[in-house]
Image (cartoon, rainbow, N blue to C red):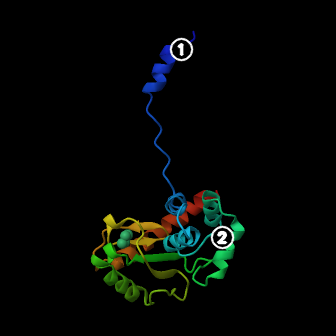
Amino acid sequence: MSIPAEVATAVKAAAPKAPAAPVDEITLIANKWKNKRGSLIMALHDLQSRVGYVPRESAMKLGHLMDVPLARIYEVVTFYNYFKLEAPGKYVISVCLGTACHIKGSAELLSGMEKELNIKEGQSTPDKEYHLQAVRCLGCCGLAPLVSVNGKVYAKLKTNESHHVIERIQIDKPMAVADAEDLAD
Ligand code: FES
């Protein structure tokens, strides 16, 4: 027996809507800079602030969303020494020193990280496991002070909590390895 059209329409209307797909970081960056002057450099800067370098896949997606050819992106990235094409460390730790985070003590967090890892800002550990960098405003000032590790945000930290972030990375490592093994199966 077929369902009358009006019943089918009513059922469809009452059905719960699928949750909206989360907007990924590259889309956020593209939307933020798309129509601004000098936008490509700023978008690439934003991307590198978040992940520590300019991964090829991200550059491709950014180019697609901003309507910029990949060749142009590589022209910019290779022209400025600032941009990196390879990950400077397995875990890129970005401490936000933007105004809101600075007011809430992020400089102390950064110096705690330097002591914890025995490197200075801008350096990587000799085993290339960690890279420490200072960045300007990651765009979530309400969560200040914050630190991002490979794009994962640790928010509302206390100034003496730098070791917690490092511990968290250590705890998450086996899980990341297990996930990678699952994907390989
Ligand atoms: S100042 Fe740190 S997120 Fe804006």
Label located before the other in sequence (1 or 2): 1
Image side of residue 38 versus residue 78, left or right: left
Is residue 75 or residue 108 the one in the foreground? 75
For this orientation, the residue located farthest to the top is 1
Q: Residues within 10 Å of mark 2 (few under 14, many from 20)?
A: some
Residue designated by label 1 = 5
The residue at 49%/61% (across/down) is: 32
Q: Quadrant of the N terminus?
A: top right
Looking at the rendered structure, the number of numbered marks drawn on it comes to 2
Rendering coords of residue 185 (x, y %): 64, 56
Ligand 1, image quadrant it occupies = bottom left
The residue at 60%/72% (across/down) is: 54
Residue designated by label 2 = 73
Q: Does the closest atom of ligand 1 sit within 8 Å of the Cβ of label 1?
A: no
Q: Amino acid at mark 2?
A: Ile
Q: Amino acid at mark 1?
A: Ala
Q: Secondary structure at mark 1?
A: helix
For this orientation, the residue located farthest to the front is 37
Vertical arrangement, residue 144 with respect to residue 24, above or below: below
The residue at 37%/76% (across/down) is: 98
